Image (cartoon, helix red, strand yellow):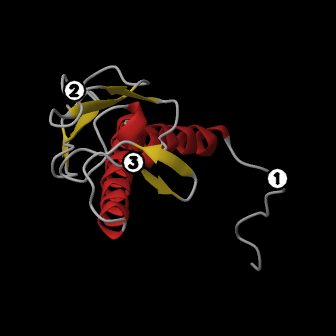
Amino acid sequence: MKNMIPARNQKGFTLIELVMVIVILGILAAFALPRFADFGTEAKVATLNGAAGSVKSAAAIAHARWVADGSTASASVNLDGATGITMSAAGYPTSDAAGIGTAAQLSDEFTITDGTDVSTDAATISLDASSGTCEFDYDPTTGNTTLNSSNNC
């Protein structure tokens, strides 16, 4: 009467247990995959935001140096690691590679499209590795940036 249920000498899992674990993992993966699949777009937007912040900071630093040097309209500014930055009459780097391109020292993954008049017209700075609109504008009269990115950035 001691052992009404005979002891089973079982090692491992049954086939039903293994199939149930695989089914549960498949269901979890189906719900989790869409949440992680869109990190490429988020990374590009974060890169664009970082570059816009870098450009805005570089413009502010160059403007501060321009003011400290005496605010002459035709003078170029030298910063640590960036020399010969061309400045607009408003005291911010011009909207070309010799101005904001030199001041911000962006990587090669960005392209600067100059304004018609680099002293007054905005430059468009775009991220090369994007399929959609992934760019921002830099204004050489104020040093401000404006994001122009789309959802497909």
Residue 11: mark: 1
Alpha-carbon span between mark 1 and mark 3: 80 Å
Residue 63 at what x, y percent from top left?
30, 59
Between marks 2 and 3 in the image, the one whose residue lies nearer the viewer: 3
**Residue 33 visible in the current orientation:** no
Residue position for label 2: 115
User: Which image quadrant for residue 62?
Assistant: bottom left
Instruction: Return the disc, 1 or 2, that comes first in the chain's sequence.
Output: 1
Q: Which residue is drawn at 26% across and 51% down?
A: 92
Q: How many labels does the image show?
A: 3
Q: Which of 111 and 42 is in front in this view?
A: 111
Circle 1 SS class: loop
Residue 113 visible at all: yes
Q: Residue 150 falls in which quadrant of the image?
A: top left
User: Residue at the spot x=24%, y=25% of the render?
Assistant: 133
Amino acid at pointer 3: Ser
Q: Quadrant of the C terminus?
A: top left
Q: Name the residue under label 3.
A: 76
Whether pointer 1 and pointer 2 mark residues with C-beta atoms closer than 8 Å, the reply is no
Residue 116 vs 38, above or below: the answer is above
Residue type indicated by callout 1: Lys
The secondary structure type at the circle numbered 3 is loop
Quarter-of-image position of residue 34 = top left
Ranked by sequence position, the earlier of labels 1 and 3 is 1
User: Disc 2 to disc 3, how far (Cα)?
Assistant: 19 Å
Left-right relation of 18 to 8: left
Q: Is residue 117 left or right of residue 153?
A: left
Q: What residue is drawn where x is 34% and y is 31%?
A: 96
- The kind of residue tagged 2 is Gly
